[in-house]
Amino acid sequence: MNRDTITRYQYMFIIVGTMIGIGIGFLGSSGAAVAHQDSWITTLISGIYPLIIVITAYIIDKKANHDDFWIILKKVYGKLIGFIILLIFLMYFLTIMSSVVAGFSNNLTQTISSFLSPYRIIIPCLLVSTVITMSGLNTVGRISEFYFYLTIVFILPLLFLIPEGTILNIQPVFHSPKEIPRGMLENLTQYSLVEISFIIISKISNRKHVLRAGIIACTITTVIYTFVSFVVIYYLGWELASRIDFPLFYMIGTISFPIFSNLTSIFIFFWGLIVLKTIVCCNYMVSYCISSFSGLSDKTSAMISSCIVLVYSYFMISEHNRLDIVDFYLKYFILFSLVFGIMTAILVQVRYRSKKNEKI
């Protein structure tokens, strides 16, 4: 198989892997501050967003005869507007990648490695992600497939917390229906990076049941996120959850196993591996964007992207700055992504039909 070709299963695992990353540690915090005990419901409803993205990505890919994303942009919007759109995607993936790298280093320095400077964590992460990205999308797909099963193991300890919670923490259900839309806006950002489907869907080798694979990926992510958010509220209550930056790690710290003396450290280690996979996926997307409009090789683009992220992440080492930058970009990009997906799904039928008529 070509190094930049993936199976539909790898496509599914990449989509799940990009969405489930550093954000899983924040689940139940920001949403609880707005929607209170209904925050887990807002997480569930917000799962509509990734569904819309993968469906529109499928329509675009099908109508465009599986052309490369950059070619589609030029054919549908022209070179100038297509370049601007690709640049927006580049800035988005750069921002998310830098945020994930900086957020990961911040979390480690606050928990188990306070003796390390952030860049002693950031630089090795970027080096590893660059090497993997240079190997091609197929390698990224294989890694995403492996880490999917690791993610399942990662959330299993939460089952031990359910008997310790109380149903009073999630009652009454729909207590604040007016706040649910606001809570959805907070939780939509957790589903970011699903937009990767626009770019990688054309690289699938087996076209059978591609749409189903995308929908299954979104469903799996929504179920995992809703489960984690529910357990956070059920166990901690929305008041406490809204005051904690990383509710998931806080809860894991309360679990005691006779075999393990420090379960939190083990948990963060596995979480770090999952986050590294997200960094790899982001690195591939950034490299793709740079390579598309510059004409540079994939390997050169991968090295350039890591160098840019190394500088960009400096401005996000402060957690306050990181959250401000990400919130600004994400909320606008999610709206842009929805408009882009729906509009392109409509325009691509017109543009490619006219191209076909010209050939006739």
Image (tube, rainbow, N blue to C red):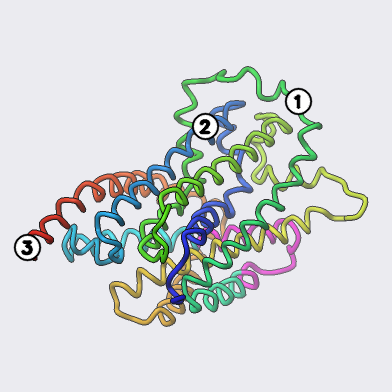
Q: Amino acid at mark 3?
A: Glu
Q: Which numbered disc, 3 or 2, marks the residue that appears first in the sequence?
A: 2
Which quarter of the picture shows residue 94? bottom left
Dot in front, 3 or 2: 3
Nearer-the-camera pick, 246 or 45: 45
Position in image of residue 312 (x %, y %): 47, 66
Q: Which label is found at residue 42?
A: 2
Dot 2: few (<14), some (14–19), or many (≥20) neighbours within 10 Å? many
Q: Position of residue 281 (x, y in %)?
A: 50, 64
Find residue 4 and report its horizontal and vertical position in percent.
43, 73
| Residue visible at 39% across and 66% down in the picture | 203
Q: Which residue is mark 3?
A: 358
Q: From the image, tell me which residue sits under label 1.
A: 166
Q: Earlier in the sequence, mark 1 or mark 3?
A: 1
Residue at point 74%, 44% (across, down): 250
Read off the magenta span: 98-121
At horizontal 59% and vertical 54% (from top left) the residue drawn is 22
Height in image: 171 above or below 100? above
Mark 1 secondary-structure assignment: loop
Q: What predominant SS class does the magenta segment belong to?
A: helix
Q: Separation of disc 1 and disc 3 at Cα?
A: 66 Å
Instruction: Judge whether residue 100 is colored magenta.
Output: yes
Disc 1 vs disc 2: Cβ atoms closer than 8 Å? no
